[in-house]
Image (cartoon, grey):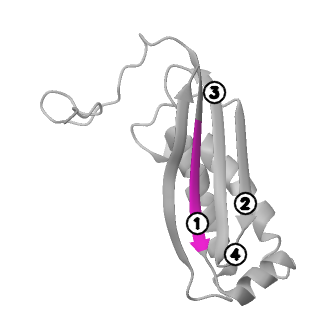
């Protein structure tokens, strides 16, 4: 088993020193899903949710979350983000959110992509909770990460 990078020899939490790493273009893609009732999906499509345009607000919330990941996750490095793309796909049983985050730096943007997806899904939940009491958020995962 590989050792955890965020603990020292005594098992204490620590921030990893990435200062010695070269700057590289880094990309991460994450995805998640929120299950919704058919009537809720119809209201989203027709932009009739009382709180407003669910998809646009969720997309903006996801972008904000990616930019603030290091403030939410204690050992996450603050890094410059060069691109964030949050997209939705309305499916038969819910909404799938996909986020792609890019930077050039010493560490990856996995946490930023995962934060974007999670907060976008939570925003959909918040905006639809008055009309749908059975929503389920799930399937949040890192789909891809790479560096060049």
Instruction: Give the quadrant of residue 5.
Output: top left
Q: Does residue 147 appear anywhere in the picture? A: yes
User: What residue is pinned by disc 2?
Assistant: 88
Which mark is first along the chain, 4 or 2? 2
Name the mark on residue 33.
1
What separation in Å lies between label 2 and label 4 (alpha carbons)?
Answer: 15 Å
Q: Start and end of the magenta stretch? A: 28-34
Q: Which of 85 and 81 lies nearest the eye of the viewer? A: 85
Q: CA distance from mark 1 to mark 3?
A: 25 Å
Return the mark for residue 127: 4
Q: Nearer the viewer, mark 1 or mark 3?
A: 1
Mark 4 or mark 3, whichever is nearer to me: 3
Cα–Cα gap, marks 2 and 1: 10 Å
Q: Which residue is mark 3?
A: 103
> What x and y, as percent, mark residue 91?
70, 72
N-terminal of the pair, mark 4 or mark 1, is 1
What kind of element bears circle 1?
Answer: strand
Residue 128 at what x, y percent from top left?
68, 80
Quadrant in which residue 94 is drawn: bottom right
Magenta run includes residue 89: no
Labels 2, 3: front one: 2
């Amino acid at each position: 088993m590989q050792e955890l990078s965020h603990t020292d020899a005594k098992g204490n939490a620590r921030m990893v020193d990435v200062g010695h790493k070269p700057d590289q273009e880094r990309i991460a893609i994450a995805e998640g899903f929120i299950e919704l009732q058919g009537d809720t999906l119809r209201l989203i499509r027709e932009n009739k949710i009382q709180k407003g345009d669910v998809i646009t607000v969720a997309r903006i919330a996801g972008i904000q979350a990616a930019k603030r990941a290091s403030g939410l996750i204690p050992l996450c490095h603050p890094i410059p983000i060069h691109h964030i793309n949050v997209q939705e796909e309305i499916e038969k049983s819910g909404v799938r959110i996909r986020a792609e985050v890019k930077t050039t730096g010493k560490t990856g943007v996995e946490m930023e992509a995962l934060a974007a997806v999670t907060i976008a899904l939570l925003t959909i939940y918040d905006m639809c909770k008055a009309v749908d009491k059975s929503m389920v958020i799930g399937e949040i995962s890192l789909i891809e990460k790479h560096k060049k």
